[in-house]
Amino acid sequence: MTNQVRLSTWASNIAPSPTLAVDAKAKELKAAGEDVCGFGAGEPDFDTPEFIKEACIKALSEGKTKYAPAPGIPALREALAEKYRNQNGVDGVTAAQCIVSPGGKYSCYLAILAVISPGDEVIIPAPYWVSYPEMVKLAGGVPKTVFVGQEAGFKMNPEQLRAAITPKTRLVIFNSPSNPTGAVYSPSELQELTEVAIEAGIYIMSDEIYEYLLYDGVQHVSPASFSKEAADSVITVSGFSKTFSMTGWRLGTLMAPPAIAKAVASLQSQTSSNATTFAQYGALAAMENWDKSMAAVNAMIEVFDRRRISLIQGLEAIKGFECARAQGAFYLFPRIDKLGMSSADFSARILEEEKVAVVPGEGFGAPGYIRLSYATSDEVINKGLERLSRFCASLKE
C-alpha cells in the first residue's frame, strides 16, 4: 500500500511566491543559454559595499561563529535604536525595542505572529507585497484587502481604512515606499491613516524596507514618529537587504513597543534562534560608518533614478500601457488591461515568445497590472523595451 502524503492545513493553503518563481524561471532559461531580459528580480544588481563585506570576513576569522542572543548582538541593537531616535524621529527608542532577524520577510512574519490570533482580521491595501496575505493566513488570521488602483496613486485614504475596520480587525499594514508600485505616502497622508488606526485601537505594521530608495525629492516618514500613541501602536519592520544590497545576507530588523519586541524575541528564540552571527557584524559596520554607507546608497540611487526615467518613458511609448511615475523602491507597476488579456497570460506569453520576464499583477492582488524591476542593467532595459513593444504591436495585428 502506497503511503499517501497528507500535508498540514498551513502547507496546503500557502501559495508559492510568484516573484521568486519568475526570477527562478528567468535564471533557469539563462542557464540553458536563452537571452532573457529579466525584470522580475526584487534585489539590487549592485554588490554589497566592500567595507561591509570586510567587517563580516573579519568577524568570521575572529571566530564569531557561535550563537548570538536571539534578539541580535547588543551593539547592533543599540545602533538601530540610535538610528530610529536620530534619523526617524521616534523618541525614546531603546535597544530592547530593536530586534535583528533572519531577513526583512521574517521580521514581517514575526510582527504578525506577535499580535494576530486565529480569526483576527488584517487590513492590507492592494496592490500589496505578495507575502503579506500568506503570512496572515499562516498566523491563522484573515487578510482583508482594500484595492487602491493607479487612479488613486496606489494609496489608501482614511475613509477606505475606516470603512474596512470591523470588530475583528487587529492590524493594518502600511508599505511606503511600496513594493510593487513604488508609491510613497506623504507625511500628511500617513499621519491621517495612523490617526484612524489609533482611534480604532488597532496595530500598524509599517514595512519600511525601501525607506532610503527615494526619487523626485519625496520624503520618507515613519508612522511611529507622529506621537507617543503612534509609537505605542506601530511595529516598524525593515532590514539591510535593499538599502545596502545585502539580500542574500538575510538580515532584517524590527522596532516595536517593549512588550511586542519582547514577544518577538521569544518567538524568534523558538524558531530561528538568531540571525547569522558574523553577518550581524557586517550590518554593524554599515551602521557605524554611516557616511560611507550613504555614499554607496546614493551612488546606487543615482543609477536607479536614471533607469527609472528610461523605463517609464519606454513603457509610456507602448500602446496599451499606462505607467504611473513611481517615486520609491525600484519597481514600476504599469496597467496593461487595455491589451485584452490577463496579466498572467501576458506574463506567460512574453516570457515564452520574447524571453522577457515580468511578474503578473495577480500575485499582488492587482489583476490587469504587471511589475517590472529596474534593478537590472541599461542593456536589459533597452532590449526588454524593444521586445515588449514588438510583442504588444503583434497583438494589434
Image: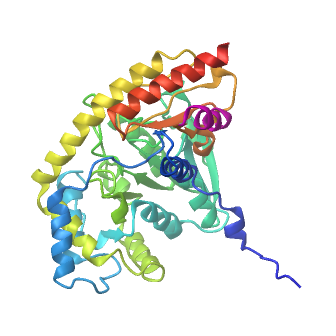
The magenta stretch spans residue 352: yes
Taking depth in this image into account, of 333 and 167 the one nearest to the observer is: 333
Q: Horizontal and vertical percent for residue 343?
A: 63, 33
Among all residues in the image, which is located at the extreme front?
A: 33
The residue stretch that appears in magenta: 344-355
Seen at 57% across and 36% down, the residue is 160
Image quadrant containing the C terminus: top right
Seen at 61% across and 66% down, the residue is 138
Q: Horizontal and vertical percent for residue 323?
A: 48, 24
Q: Main secondary structure of the magenta part?
A: helix
Please identify the quarter of the rendering in which residue 216 is found. top left
- Residue 251 in sight in this render: no
Taking depth in this image into account, of 169 and 177 the one nearest to the observer is: 177
> Relative to residue 311, is residue 4 drawn left or right?
right
Seen at 19% across and 41% down, the residue is 298
Q: Horizontal and vertical percent for residue 212?
A: 27, 45
